[in-house]
Image (spheres, helix red, strand yellow):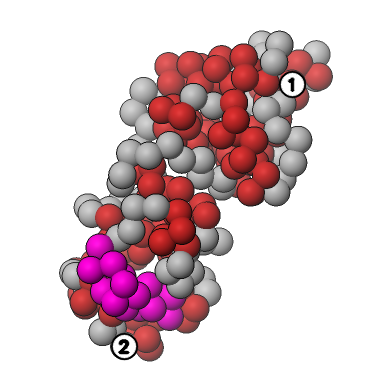
Amino acid sequence: MTKKQRALLAVEALKKKYPDSLCSLNAENPLQLIIATRLSAQCTDARVNLVTPALFEKYKTVEDFAAADIDEFAEIVHSCGFFRQKAKDIVGMSQKMIADFGGRVPDNLDDLTSLPGVGRKTANLIMGDVYGKPAVVADTHLIRISNLLGLVATKDPLKVEMQLREILPPEESNDFCHRCVLHGRDTCVSGRPKCGECEMKDFCSFAKSKK
């Protein structure tokens, strides 16, 4: 079985299990999503979702975020960890969006990664979820599950992204990443995967190696 064939089986299996492939971060618009994604670095989505209601109540527009006091902002997002750097990045990205992109969240990788604190993972999430472009969000769940399935053999996020782009149908790639997050939380749990319950056990390299 080729990697592309295995990838197609994985796409269909997870699509059947999780027909609604939604981002775990709560956001009502592109600005809120890029801010929530920056806060989620080295922090759980659940924690971010507890913090953002108060944050988005206080700061409603890109101008509000651009003019925010760093200390006040950091206090609100304190429980997300690395709060001061995240506060600086979010204020900085808001200022740059106003200065360079008319106050809009950019729609391409180069412009998105030019914003403070925005790497490829965040940029891919925005491109896929907001603009409907083919995207591979190489987070920890996707990296782990792709390796276990035998789709990739690297833990380097960039290499995982590039290799998955070669074998995933472009129109399915973004949803596949979201589904891997859900699957990684309830079945393919880090360090204790429930292979016996997994819909992909018949073609997963790791599950087959345990037989």
Q: Please say if the residues under marks 1 and 2 sit with CB atoms less than 8 Å apart.
A: no
What x and y, as percent, mark residue 21? 38, 32
Q: Rate crowding at label 1 as few (under 14), some (14 to 19) or many (20 or more) other CA atoms within 10 Å.
A: some
Secondary structure of the residue carrying tag 2 is loop
Circle 2 packing at 10 Å, graded few (<14), some (14-19), many (20+), is few
Q: Can you give x and y, in whole percent of width and height, for residue 34 in the image?
A: 36, 59
- Residue where numbered disc 1 is placed: 205
> Which picture quadrant has residue 90?
bottom left
147 with respect to 17 (left or right): right
Q: Position of residue 119 (x, y in %)?
A: 52, 60
Residue 68 pos. (x, y %): 28, 83
Residue beneath label 2, please? 69
Q: Which residues are magenta?
A: 88-104
Q: CA distance from mark 1 to mark 2?
A: 50 Å
What kind of residue is marked 1?
Ser
- The quarter of the rendered structure image containing the N terminus is top right
The dot on residue 178 is none
N-term mark: 1 or 2: 2
- Look at label 2 and name its amino acid: Asp
Identify which residue is drawn at 67% across, 28% down. 151
Give the main secondary structure of the magenta stretch: helix
Query: Quick one: SS at disc 1?
Result: helix
